[in-house]
Image (cartoon, rainbow, N blue to C red):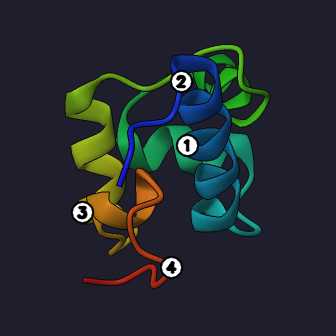
Amino acid sequence: MHRPKNKDLRFLISNRLITIFGKDTNAIVAAKINVTESQVSQYKRNLSTPGIETLFDIAVTYNASLDYIFNLKDEIKT
C-alpha cells in the first residue's frame, strides 16, 4: 500500500471524521473531544487536521479505529 500525498490524506481524514461524527453538532463533538467548535469545523472542512492526541480522543470517544480514520480499513470499528 502506498502512502497518499499529504493533501489527499488530509482530505481522506476529513471525510472519515464527518462520517464518524455523524449527526453530532460541532458543539457536541467539541465537548466530547475537548476542542473548540471552530476546530471541529476546520477538521470537517479540510482546513486543519487533528493532532495525534485529538485523533486518539476521537478514536476512543467514537469507538473508531485509527486504521479507519487513516483510510486503511473500511470498517469503522476495530
Label 4 – label 3 distance at C-alpha: 17 Å
Label 3 vs 2, first from the N-terminus:
2
Q: Which residue is mark 3?
A: 60
Label annotation for residue 5: 2
Tell which residue pokes out farthest to the front in this image: 2
Q: Is residue 17 above or below residue 73?
A: above
- Three-letter residue code for mark 4: Asp
Q: Earlier in the sequence, mark 1 or mark 2?
A: 2
Which residue occupies the foreground of this view, 55 or 2? Answer: 2
> Is 74 situated above or below 38?
below
Label 4 sits on residue? 74
Which label lies toward us, 3 or 1? 1
Q: Which residue is mark 1?
A: 13
Quarter of the figure with the N terminus: bottom left
Write down the quadrant of residue 63 in the picture: bottom left
Mark 1 lies on a secondary structure that is helix
Which quadrant: the C terminus? bottom left
Relative placement, left or right, of 4 versus 63 is: right
Q: As displayed, is residue 4 above or below residue 13?
A: above
Which mark is drawn over residue 56?
A: none
Q: Earlier in the sequence, mark 4 or mark 3?
A: 3
- The residue at 43%/55% (across/down) is 69
Q: Disc 3 marks which amino acid?
A: Val
SS for callout 4: loop
